[in-house]
Amino acid sequence: MIKTISTTPYGDQKMGTAGLRKKSQTAMQPNYVENFMQSIFNTIGKLDDKTFLVGGDGRFYNDIAIQKIIKMAAANGVKKLVIGQNGFISTPAGSNVILKNKLDGGFVLSASHNPGGPNGDFGIKYSNQTGGQVPSSVTDKIFENTKNIKEYKICDTADIDLSKLGKQQLCGMEIEIIDPVSGYVDMMREIFDFEAIKQLFAKGFTMRFDAMNAVTGPYAVRIFEELLGAAPGSVVNAVPLPDFGGLHPDPNLVYAKELVDLMFSDNAPDFGAANDGDGDRNMILGKKFFVTPSDSLAILTDNFHLIPAYKNGIYGVAKSAATSTAVGRVAQARNIGYYEVPTGWKYFVNLMDSKRITFCGEESFGTGSAHIREKDGIWAVLFWLNIIAATGKSVEEITLDHWQKYGRSYYMRFDFDGLDTTVADKLMADLEAALPKLSGKTFNGYTVSDAAPFIYNDPVDGSSTKNGLVIKFSDGSRIVYRLSGTGSSGATLRVYLEKYEVEKLREDPQQTLKQILEVAMNIAEITPRTGKLQADVIT
Ligand code: VG1
Ligand code: CO
């Protein structure tokens, strides 16, 4: 039943910030998924003692791709696959399954926060035994393999029934279908004070959680409504749909519009949150109040002692370079380690494995801890609920307290989408070349103190990564430029702005950052080069 099929390479199967991400139509081309998976199997080598996790966020084409992966794993001699029931598992739940059961890695079929459907995106995230996505040294090898692939192996059988929990066999490979929710829920119960949060809801606390028709619906209903007692209906868009019901499952102020409108209305519940397609991102809102992800990371870190799992202390904390420096002030005050890494969760993995950090986060609505090796949307929501339950304060009060204690980093991100790749690459190259000449110059009253590419030297494996360009000003303000590595067509330029204030704590970020935005646009010549007068998405 095992067949060897000849194939020809596609030249574009390079993984980006988080796995392979392509238009569904691209991924649906003959042998596209097969070539990519065979290249991974070839790169791993010995497979007869290996067990992998397989699951996904339920998006369009996952059902077909997952069957291909199962049949190919069997034909390639993989020992065992652990598969989420009906092919579902969130990225954080998948990381937990790998770690807890000491698996050799896994495949989560998701393009994360990108839209799904026949005209949306498809993706595959590949993790190793750490439970985190493989480092660039591995993705490079896989890419090389995809460029030379000549054949793949597949077991020629009928599709596997993924609805039936328990064990089965396929072409000599063991398959175990698991409930994707229960193990994750058990882990959350061990970390947080469920009793305290339950009492909070019992006293009438209200929340809305928007699962955006993606993978977290079943997790959120189980945890928030069934276990913690949030009112039925608190979780909305709770049934995962292949096209996310037309939603763009990116939990930010632009795409989670329904939730944002409610939270800024007079009918707002006490607390609002949303997750992305694969459940690793989170957005936190209070009544008429938005918490930036950078502030959220700083606030969670400063309140670690309120959470049962962390009350005895934490190692350090890390953030991506583009994320605001707010958490750095907490790290300093708390006297814990502090690391800045390139964008992408995979860079946190070595720091967690070597016990250098406990918490980490990114400005892109990602927060997490060393309980797993991926960011974790529901974890962040529970962390906030636990702080609220422990302090009796609202989201706004908690955030204001934080700013009063540490000052506030006004922070915004501006995305310029759909750029011509050549134009975007040239903009970055020219800007990088111009950086040395910027030092000491003043723009709109801001004097450049330092301008250089961000370079990360991993303290564990010694690898060096360059990602993004950073301009620092003498008052602590910063501009970071980088190109997105998760898009499926064209280029996206991201411009991240930050300004630190100790006294003016309640200004409008857009106003506060207006001058710096102008500087950022001018220095990089964004309008003349791209034709864009303003950003497409502002978060
Ligand atoms: C974006 C974010 C980055 C995040 C990545 C994956 O990458 O900026 O912080 O880690 O998405 O998120 P980029 O290269 O487009 O800026 V997800 O929710 O895929 O796992
Ligand atoms: Co995601």
Image (cartoon, rainbow, N blue to C red):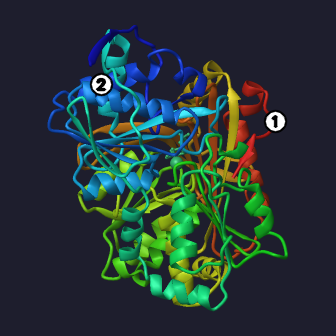
- At horizontal 41% and vertical 11% (from top left) the residue drawn is 9
Question: In the figure, residue 33 lies in which quadrant?
Answer: top left
Residue 235 higher or lower than 128, as above or below: below
Assign the N terminus to one quadrant of the image: top left
Q: Is residue 301 left or right of residue 98?
A: right
Q: Amino acid at mark 2?
A: Lys
Q: Which mark is residue 195?
A: none
Q: Which mark is residue 533?
A: 1
Q: Is 64 or 258 nearer to us in this picture?
A: 64
Q: Residues within 10 Å of mark 2 (few under 14, many from 20)?
A: some
Query: Which residue is outermost to the right?
Result: 266
Can I make out residue 247 in this image? no
Q: SS class of the residue under badge 2?
A: helix
Residue 326 higher or lower than 394, as above or below: above
Residue 341 higher or lower than 209, as above or below: above
Q: Amino acid at mark 1?
A: Leu
x%, y% of residue 393? 62, 87
x%, y% of residue 277? 57, 48
Q: Is 368 or 417 nearer to us in this picture?
A: 368
x%, y% of residue 97? 32, 55
Q: Is 350 or 478 nearer to us in this picture?
A: 350
Q: Is residue 390 left or right of residue 497?
A: left
Task: Please state which of the two labelled residues, at mark 1 or mark 2, is closer to the viewer.
Answer: 2
Sequence-wise, which precedes: disc 1 or disc 2? 2
Q: SS class of the residue under badge 1?
A: loop
Question: In the figure, residue 520 lies in which quadrant?
Answer: top right
The residue that label 2 is drawn on is 141
Can I make out residue 437 in this image? yes
Q: Is residue 58 left or right of residue 370?
A: right
Instruction: Find the distance from the CA under tag 1 to the CA under tag 2.
Output: 40 Å
x%, y% of residue 246? 72, 42
- At horizontal 36% and vertical 18% (from top left) the residue drawn is 146
